[in-house]
Image: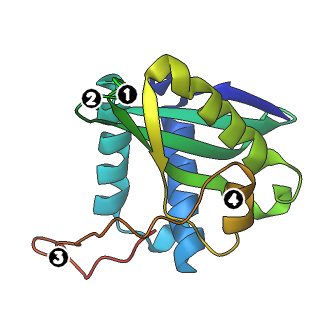
Amino acid sequence: MQIRAASVDEDLDTLCRLRLEFVADHRGIAVADLSSAFVDATRVWLSDSHRDGRLRSWLATMDGSPVGSTSLALHDLPPRPEDHRSVDGRLLNVWVQPACRRRGVATALLEACLAAGPALGVRSWSLHATDDGRPLYASLGFVDNLAWMERLDVAGTEEAPTPP
């Protein structure tokens, strides 16, 4: 297994394919069932977000083939008196192809991502956890935080949003 930082210029097709596999897997559908508008919007978002520095991604390969990925969305925050770092890191799409799970791939992806945090100025990390992923995230220091609330705005969507 090899873990490496992704390059949008070289890896956009792979990142897009793995993101689509992630969404389809979590929704219990085939990638082919995703609308072409969603596929196009995903590709544009991945490209634009990497190019402007709001997103970093890592790829896992086995025998030269991509088998998993994760991304880190970077959000600016104001500094605190006790901590001048000003970046929130939101982990997105920690995903490994089913045939390659339970081999440490997700752990290696997350460790690479977390190791990049200091250089990126990340002071806090967040993610949406699946039941399957919770033990892994907990083993890496993530805890439930009941302080946050969220509101999903359904205006302008084709369908009611379902978290990926």
Q: Residues within 10 Å of mark 4 (few under 14, many from 20)?
A: few
Q: Is residue 61 among what the camera can see?
A: yes
In this rendering, is residue 41 above or below 124? below
Label 3, secondary structure: give it. Answer: loop
Disc 3 vs disc 2: which is toward the camera? 2
Which amino acid type corresponds to the residue marked 4 in the rendered image? Answer: Ala
x and y percentages locating residue 66 in the rendered image? 71, 40
Q: Nearer the viewer, residue 163 or 159?
A: 163
Camera-side mark, 3 or 4? 4
Circle 4 residue? 138
Q: Which residue is mark 3?
A: 154
Of label 3 and label 4, which has the lower sequence position?
4
**Left or right: 155 with respect to 26?**
left
- The residue at the point 82 percent across, 59 percent down is 101
Kindly indicate the quadrant of the structure image that contains residue 148: bottom left
Q: CA distance from mark 2 to mark 1?
A: 6 Å
Residue denoted by label 2: 79
| Residue contact between numbered discs 3 and 4, judged by CB atoms under 8 Å | no
